[in-house]
Structure formats: structure tokens, C-alpha cells
Image: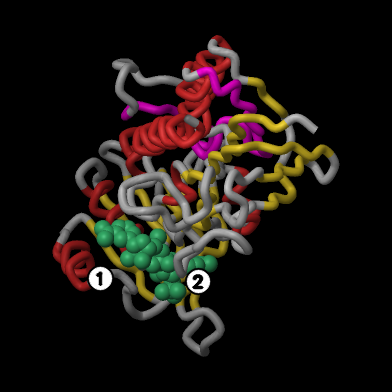
Amino acid sequence: MSVHQCFIIGSGPAGYTAAIYASRANLNPVLIEGSQVGGQLTITTEVENFPGYPDGVNPYQMMDDMRRQAERFGTTFVSGVVTEVVLDSEAERPIHKVVVDNSTEYSTYTLIIATGASARWLGLPSEKEFMGRGVSGCATCDGFFYRGKTVAVVGGGDTACEEAMYLANLCKKVYMIVRKPFLRASEIMQQRVKNNEKIEILFEHNTRQLTGEGKVSGAELVYKQGSQEEEIRHIDIDGFFVAIGHQPNTKLFADYLDLDEEGYIVVAGDSPCTKIKGVFAAGDCADRKYRQAIVAAASGCKAAIEADKYLK
Ligand code: NDP
């Protein structure tokens, strides 16, 4: 079996950028696209914060542009999902194995993992129904569309507080729907949301369903679910932001690489280097902090440069 120089797993901004750089460095990269071609961005409606698009861009268009750019320089694309990897941490010149769709096996000297993260969702049928039509997982991406409107953020962690603060700058009113009687966020973030007069925190509320015709116009909440004081309450909202945490897509690598307590791949400092020679991690699978397309793209670039350097 021939050994490839560079394999990339993932088709978000990190994966495609790694592919552009790796193909321009003549590494003949092969990119496995995964189940959500284009990555997390494709669940947003419009991208307005990626430099180079002054009028904003449709996320599918942007990801297709990146894909075509990688293709132009010779990236090979494989449609499918990686179901197994075998990473070699022993050999002097390790060869890593990648299995796609439980059937096709590839060997490679370098592997760039750009599998991203998935936002956690509540799992309500109406949440799915209104995805991109009032339901969002990213205030920085979609908040702008709700200028002057009323929105709700679900969650009581730092992300939810950050999203609420961001939205309070744009919106008329922001509800925070928190299932416990307290916030889990850091003290400073708690103080900020509590001191913001546009933010109303609804403690001990769970979301039962979203309502609306074609787009979100309200939410049905349950106050003190399961107790004697249980009560159904309704709020009128235009947007519903879910901020209950992210799950990095890294399970496949858990037997080989160090993952932090939340499952993000541990890399050496600012670099994309993992503890295994020839294996690099780029984008949200190794970034618990920023989770932005531009940051993911930059780390994809770094990973390809490191892969090239390693091969040489
Ligand atoms: P967290 O896991 O910290 O918080 C998730 C929040 O969502 C909790 O309030 C949790 O409630 C709530 N939640 C989870 N599942 C549900 C559900 N099914 N229904 C309703 N609510 C639910 O995630 P974050 O994304 O906020 O933060 C992740 C990590 O990143 C943290 O370590 C955080 O500190 C860090 N972070 C740091 C930032 C900063 O320093 N500026 C910014 C953003 C994140 P409950 O408490 O009841 O479990």
C-alpha cells in the first residue's frame, strides 16, 4: 500500500486551509470531508466576520470557495467519515493509518486532525425545525440579525454569559434561561450579566418548546420543573441562542493523544503539534477558547507548515 505524505480529516476552515497550504507545498494532501461538509459554519445563515467579505457571505459559498481553492492546488477529496485511526508513537519514521467508512484504509506520514467541535443542543424537535430561522448556536455569527429585537440565551456558563453580553449590545432585551437557581459562570461574568439592565435571568427555567410560524416568535418555558410550584410560562422572542457547551469531535483519538478534561486535543503551546510525531491538530478540536472560523483557518495553516517541516 502506498504511503501518503499528508492526510487531513475535516472540511471546515481549518481542514481546507491546511489543504491549501499543504497542496501548495507539494504534499499532495488527501482530505476526508466527514459527515458535515463545510463544518459548523454551515449551520449559520450568513458569515459577516470573516475578513475579505465586506458584504458578508453565505457560509456554503465561503466553504465552497475554500474547497475550490484547495482543489486548484491539487488536494484530493474523499467523501466519507473516518471510522478508525491507528497512530504510531513508536517508530523512528511513523506511518499512521486512517480507515474511512469502515472499509478503505489509508497510510500517511502526516495527519492533520481538523474534526472541529459540535455545539450541544437541547434536543427539542422545534429547535431542529427552526434551525437557522431563529435558532442559533453562535451569537458572534448571528447576533447581528437580531438588532433591536428580543432574544433568549440558554445556559448558565461562561459561554452563555458572553453570548448574552454580546447580544445585549445589539438587542432590545435578552433573556437568559438557566435551569439551576444559580449561574455556573465565573464570578466576573456573573456580575456583568447581573448588572446589565437589558439582561433578565430566568433561573430554574427549562425550555419546553419553541413556537412560531416559519420562524421563532416565542418559547414555552417550564418554571421549577417537577416541583409542586411547576408552572408553564411563555416569552415572546425573535431569536433563541443555545449556549450549553461544545463537544469536540475527538473520540477517535482518545486512545492515542492527550485530551483535556473536556475532550479537546492537547497541543504543545501555540503550535498544532500533538505528542505523536507527524500528527497535528488544528481548529476547534484543539481550541476550547476562541472557536472562530478565522482562528481555525490560521491553525490549519500552521498545521500544514509544521507537517511540511516535519516531512523535510
Ligand atoms: P459549561 O459546561 O461551563 O456550561 C454549560 C451551561 O449550560 C451550564 O450552565 C449548564 O447547566 C447548561 N446546560 C447544559 N446542558 C443543559 C440543558 N440540557 N438544558 C439547559 N441548560 C443546560 O459550558 P461553556 O460553553 O459555558 O464553557 C465551557 C468552558 O469554557 C468552561 O470551562 C468555561 O469556563 C470556558 N469558557 C471561558 C470563557 C472565558 O474565560 N472568557 C468564555 C467561554 C467559555 P448546569 O450548570 O445546570 O449544568
Q: Give the residue type that dot 2 points to.
A: Val
Q: Nearer the viewer, residue 116 or 192?
A: 116
Q: Which residue is mark 1?
A: 186
Q: Does residue 74 appear to the left or right of 25 in the view shown? A: right
Q: Nearer the viewer, residue 185 or 199?
A: 185
Q: Say if residue 292 shows up in the picture.
A: yes
Q: Which SS does the magenta portion mostly show?
A: loop
Q: Give the residue type that dot 1 points to.
A: Ser
Residue 222 marker: 2
Q: How is the image coloured?
A: secondary structure
Residue drawn at (45%, 46%), measured in percent from left and top?
284
Where is 191 relative to 87, above or below?
below
Mark 1 Cβ and ligand 1 under 8 Å apart: yes
Residue drawn at (54%, 50%), measured in percent from left and top?
118
Q: CA distance from mark 2 to mark 1?
A: 26 Å
Where is 242 relative to 300, above or below?
below
Looking at the image, the residue that sits furthest to the right is: 103
Looking at the image, the residue that sits furthest to the bottom is: 228
Query: Magenta includes 30?
Result: yes
Query: Circle 1: is it few (<14), some (14-19), or many (20+) Cα within 10 Å?
Result: few
Label 1, secondary structure: give it.
loop
Q: Position of residue 88 (x, y in %)?
A: 64, 53
Q: Say if residue 142 shows up in the picture.
A: no
Which range of residues does the magenta coloring cover? Answer: 26-49
